[in-house]
Image: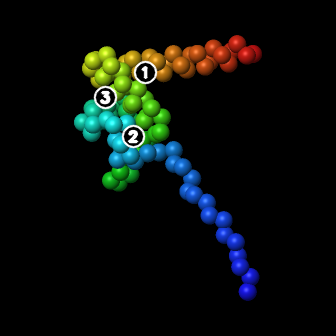
Amino acid sequence: MAIKTVTACSPAASALVAWTEFLEQTGTPVERVRELMELGWLEPASRATHAVFFRRSDIYRTRKLTRLCEDFEMPCVAGTIIVDLLDRIADLETRLRELERR
């Protein structure tokens, strides 16, 4: 009788994060997340029947927002504008570097 060797592999990492995991990783209160969703600043990547999923990049953006609002004691709406502008600057800098390489 031959023994088969089985290679164990872990499941592929998902690009999406469930609601509970998102709250844990960002440390953001439920009320704040709902507020950000109502503003349209934070949009779930998927809404299953009873589940909400976010992109992993939303974790970074939300943590950045929380840090800005806490450090500078500013309202959430002001923080979302700043994070959006910082993201836009980063995109423009990336484009500029690409154009300089040509």
Position of residue 59 relative to residue 4, above or below, is above
Disc 1 vs disc 3: which is toward the camera? 1
Identified by mark 1, the residue type is Asp
Q: Residue 59 appears at what percent x and percent y? A: 42, 35
- Of the 4 image quadrants, the one containing the C terminus is top right
Spatial separation of the CA atoms under disc 1 and disc 3: 13 Å
Which labelled disc corresponds to residue 84?
1
Residue 32 quadrant: top left
Q: Residue 75 appears at what percent x and percent y? A: 27, 20
Crowd band around label 2 with a 10 angstrom C-alpha radius: few (<14), some (14–19), many (20+): some
Relative placement, left or right, of 15 versus 74 is: right
Which labelled disc corresponds to residue 4?
none
Residue 72 quadrant: top left
Pointer 2: what residue? 25
The numbered mark, 2 or 3, whose residue comes first in the sequence reads 2
Residue 54 quadrant: top left
Crowd band around label 1 with a 10 angstrom C-alpha radius: few (<14), some (14–19), many (20+): some
Identified by mark 2, the residue type is Gln
